[in-house]
Amino acid sequence: MIYLRSLLFSTGMLVSMVFFSLAGILLFLLFVPFPVRYRFTTQWGRFTIWWLKVTCGIDYRVEGRENIPEGPAIVFSKHQSTWETLALQQIFPPQVWVLKRELMWLPLFGWTMATLKPIAIDRSAGRKAVNKIVEIGTRRLRSGLWVVIFPEGTRVPPGETRRYGIGGAVLAEKSGYPVVPVAHNAGEFWPRRAFLKRPGTIRVVIGPPIESKGRTAAEINRLAREWIEQAMGRIARASTTAESGNGKRV
């Protein structure tokens, strides 16, 4: 049943992606204003999250919504799955994403993403990539958009961590906008590069904003990493306790 449910989900996700991508590109060619295009295109994420719950039994809950500041900020999120790339659009205000430029070359999906003002970088460019994040990211923040960054740079399996890149922290230092750390366990239910999805409830935890003014990029990165990884540990322990409790009841 898990295989059939996952197949049904993937089919619906693919078909809806083609529809929203074609429509999003058309809206761009018709010079429809960005706010309208953003609201329409991100409905695909909303549909996909809903379809995931219907077909695979995967829901989510968010803790710490009170920590979301009123003005624009930089989101530092754990990256385990495709799920958070869609869900963060529903949790936070209008946003742009820092991502590798190769994604822009993907037919339909990448082309549509390119119309939504992403910060596409060449990850092998080193300091030039960081400078691009700072330059474009600051403009996006000043225009009222949030910036979403996955500081580890790629999807990491549950229980593992990678070095946090410095680009997002430099953006925070130079722009003065706060960092909002986010931890979640989506990879336990929708693993990276995995076809099968496991039913359950994803837990998303939003931390208190990290003030960037008066702090160095290294300090901002350290504070964000410490909060996220400690929160990940708490989520993992709670998940283990819940599974153990369920086992005892059986």
Image (tube, rainbow, N blue to C red):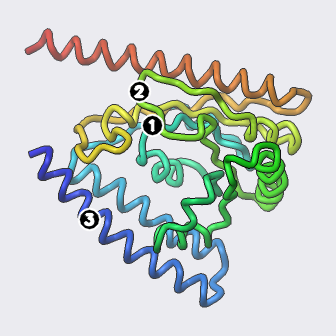
Which numbered dot is residue 12?
Answer: 3
Q: Is residue 48 left or right of residue 218?
A: left
Task: Tell me if label 2 and label 3 are in contact, CB under 8 Å.
Answer: no
Query: What's the residue at 61%, 53% (across, down)?
Result: 100
Farthest front residue in view: 124
Q: Position of residue 11 (x, y in %)?
A: 24, 64
Task: Report the residue at 23% width, 38% height from top.
Answer: 198
Which of the two discs, 1 and 3, labels the residue nearer the N terminus?
Answer: 3
Q: Contact, CB < 8 Å: mark 1 with mark 2?
A: yes
Q: Nearer the viewer, residue 100 or 211?
A: 100
Q: Image check: 226 left or right of 2? A: right
- Asked where in the image residue 176 lies, by quadrant, the reply is top right
Q: Kindly identify which numbered label has been placed on residue 80.
A: 1
Q: CA distance from mark 2 to mark 3?
A: 26 Å
Q: Is residue 61 above or below residue 55?
A: above
- Residue designated by label 2: 158
Of residues 151 and 68, the one nearer the viewer is: 151
- Going from N to C along the chain, the mark reached first, 2 or 3, is 3
Q: Amino acid at mark 1?
A: Gln
Q: Quadrant of the C terminus?
A: top left
